[in-house]
Amino acid sequence: MKINKYITSFGLFVALLSCNKDNEPKPDNDIQITQNKTTSEDKAKITINVDEFIKINTVEYKLNNSNLLNIDVSTEVIKSLTENVQKAEIIVSINKKLKEKGATQYTKTITIDQVKKFDYEIKAGKEEKYFVSAIITDKNGDRHYGTETEYKVPTTIDKDQRIAKIKSTMIIGRNTSMVLYSPAVFIGEKPTEFIVEYSKKSDFSGSVKKKINDQINSGEFAVMLSIDKLDPASKYYLRFTTTFADGKTSTSDVTSFETTNKYKIGQIYGIDGNTYAQFLVFSTNPSTQTGKVVRIQNATSSDDWKKGNVDIVIKGKTYALSRPSVKDLEELKNVEDTDSKYWLGLSTTLFSEKLEDKFYATSEEDPTDSSKTIEYNPFTKKSRSVAKKLASGTRNERYILEVK
């Protein structure tokens, strides 16, 4: 008989399967490798020495991204299977020998003419042991076992194969407070310390470090945490560091992000959660993280002019707003004319109105006559003096609010 060599590699990714009622392994997939049909004349007892046909070379253990154990079995077919053979399998038994009662077993059929990998899944256990053997089923249906070999998972596997990796970091929000979302995978031994670190300098000098041990998990998971008290309009560098019991550390890749101002031109603003009390941001101050918002609609009033805030009722609620200064009206007219983000805010806000070619009441008194106030037309850039107490008619109003 000619000697043919075939190498077959199997990754046994162990999942709980049950034995058949005779405590023999039940294959999850039968592959017939004989074309001969069994007849009554073929029922003579067949003797097969499995070790002459199939050799198990190595059994290796690898922790996967679920922190479960992959068992890789490398086999070699050292002699061609005869026509008396129906199929060949590799069998793995957990903690108990193959024919021992109650053994949990996993099988995969060997495909002789090609290389294949098969995966089963079990939870990693430091003291787990596995019994591995090849099995050949003859054409009569009888099984023949090869040499059964015991393998033990190395007790140091958790340490030897430990990984603490942050895959990426997503920033939710760009203001002085934000949320970090970072997919991660921790395999094997868990770290004793987990830190997020961020700094405005790429060398991380003067960095802020936050211990986040409560985020330590196993397998694939996501780290979510909030960071605050960031400077506006600034670039930051961020990284994660894990430390293990033996003092060794692992550092993630560096991520950078930029903060923006708390208030942005064209941003929609609602007071006290009242969605009907809509305003648009038309002015910002990055250094103080404040802004000014303007009510989206023009208004009129016949009330006497008074210094300070004006009580305005919007949808049944009263708000203390103020009249704009001449400078405020000029700034508002400028963003209406030049800022595309403000245009977008106007287009996405119902019932919003732009300034009109009219004189608007301001917050300013006439410096030459205390009984009068200044009105201003942002289109013509002209001012006029008007009595605080109107004898008739109304004032054109546009109310604003400073926000922090």
Image (spheres, rainbow, N blue to C red):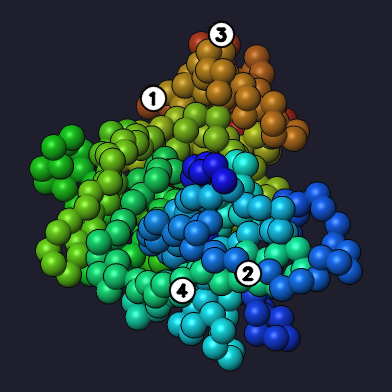
The residue tagged 2 is 47
Q: Residue at x 50, y 59 (%)?
A: 52
Is residue 129 among the parts visible in the rendering?
yes
The residue tagged 3 is 380
The residue tagged 1 is 368
Q: Which amino acid type corresponds to the residue marked 1 in the rendered image? A: Thr
Residues packed near mark 1 inside 10 Å, few (<14), some (14 to 19) or many (20 plus)? few
The x, y position of residue 130, in whole percent, is 44, 75
The image quarter containing residue 86 is bottom right
The x, y position of residue 198, in whole percent, is 24, 47
Q: Alpha-carbon distance for marks 1 and 3?
A: 22 Å
Q: Which amino acid type corresponds to the residue marked 4 in the rendered image? A: Glu
Q: Which amino acid type corresponds to the residue marked 3 in the rendered image? A: Thr
The x, y position of residue 109, in whole percent, is 64, 58
The residue tagged 4 is 148
Compare residues 151 and 373 and report the one nearer the observer. Answer: 151
Comes first in the chain, label 1 or label 3:
1
Comes first in the chain, label 3 or label 4:
4
Return the residue found at the far bottom.
101
Q: Alpha-carbon distance for marks 3 and 4?
A: 98 Å
- Pointer 3 with pointer 2, Cβ within 8 A: no
Q: Alpha-carbon distance for marks 3 and 2?
A: 109 Å
Element on which disc 1 rests = loop
Comes first in the chain, label 4 or label 2:
2
Comes first in the chain, label 4 or label 1:
4
Is residue 378 among the parts visible in the rendering?
no
Q: Residue at x 89, y 69 (%)?
A: 40
Comes first in the chain, label 3 or label 2:
2
